């Protein structure tokens, strides 16, 4: 369904009073990543703890190390076939497959509601997902989606211009450079919620 899952509460509880976590807490954070959570969150450790910065650094260190050990490409290949997909779901799955086959640096998706990047995120493609939004609210909502980097772009009425704006934004944030292969997905005509129907692959510098 592409819903976000946040794992929180007492994940590094001992770090409220101590500068290092217990082995059990480290394992809990690692398991949350392995099991595919969208986000991990600290609460008391940073709100009232004695070592808020250390707690944050520890959680980031664990998350990054575990993420690097997961073979997302293999997991995607082993994933179950979609049954009775709608157009957005099918396009999202095909986008991930294309990105995997081309070893793309990023997937760029233009979204009105945020559903398409969330669906792409669901399949854990293993590359960056740049969610290009014309709404600040949707941009904020996408911050919780796994692997999604939301970018606010100016609304356009031409798919070509919007593609260009999305690529310019991705380059500005240093997500991609001219030599990278990307997969672009959007809906044509633009601005129609649930209208994702386009996949396009290209090298950034050739666009």
Image (tube, helix red, strand yellow):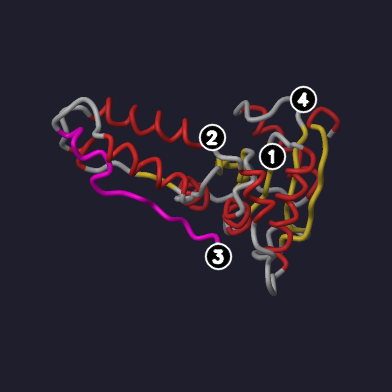
The span from disc 4 to disc 3 (Cα, nearest Å) is: 34 Å
Residue depicted at 75% across the width and 45% down the height: 184
Mark nearest the camera among 1 and 2 is 2
Residue depicted at 58% across the width and 59% down the height: 113
The span from disc 4 to disc 2 (Cα, nearest Å) is: 28 Å
The x and y percentages for residue 189 are 77, 60
Say what secondary structure mark 3 lies in.
loop
Is 169 on the left or on the right of 159, as rendered?
left
Mark 2 crowd level (few <14, some 14–19, many ≥20, 10 Å Cα): few
Residue 39 numbered mark, or none = none
The residue indicated by pointer 1 is 166
Say what secondary structure mark 2 lies in.
helix
Magenta segment range? 2-16
How many labels sit on residues? 4
Going from N to C along the chain, the mark reached first, 3 or 1, is 3
Going from N to C along the chain, the mark reached first, 4 or 2, is 2
In the rendered image, the vertical position of residue 203 relative to residue 121, given as above or below: above
The residue indicated by pointer 3 is 1
Pointers 1 and 2 in contact (CB under 8 A)?
no
The span from disc 1 to disc 2 (Cα, nearest Å) is: 30 Å
Residue depicted at 48% across the width and 50% down the height: 36
The residue indicated by pointer 4 is 178
Mark nearest the camera among 4 and 3 is 3
The span from disc 3 to disc 1 (Cα, nearest Å) is: 25 Å
Say what secondary structure mark 1 lies in.
helix
Going from N to C along the chain, the mark reached first, 1 or 2, is 2
Snapshot quadrant of residue 107: top right
The span from disc 1 to disc 4 (Cα, nearest Å) is: 14 Å
The x and y percentages for residue 118 are 57, 55
Camera-side residue: 197 or 44? 44
The residue indicated by pointer 2 is 69
């Amino acid at each position: 369904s592409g819903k976000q899952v946040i794992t929180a509460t007492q994940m590094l509880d001992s770090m409220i009073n101590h500068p290092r976590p217990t082995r059990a807490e480290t394992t809990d954070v690692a398991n949350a990543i392995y099991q595919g959570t969208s986000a991990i969150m600290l609460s008391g450790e940073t709100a009232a703890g004695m070592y808020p910065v250390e707690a944050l650094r520890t959680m980031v260190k664990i998350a990054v190390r575990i993420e690097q050990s997961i073979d997302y490409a293999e997991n995607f290949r082993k994933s179950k076939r979609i049954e009775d997909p709608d157009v957005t779901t099918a396009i999202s799955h095909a986008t991930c497959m294309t990105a995997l086959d081309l070893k793309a640096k990023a997937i760029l998706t233009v979204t009105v509601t945020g559903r398409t990047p969330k669906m792409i995120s669901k399949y854990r493609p293993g590359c960056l997902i740049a969610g290009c939004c014309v709404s600040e609210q949707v941009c904020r909502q996408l911050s919780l989606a796994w692997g999604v980097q939301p970018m606010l772009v100016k609304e356009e009425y031409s798919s070509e211009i919007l593609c260009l704006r999305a690529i310019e934004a991705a380059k500005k944030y240093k997500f991609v450079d001219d030599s990278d292969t990307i997969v672009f997905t959007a809906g044509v005509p633009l601005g129609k919620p649930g209208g994702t129907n386009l996949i396009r692959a290209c090298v950034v510098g050739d666009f």
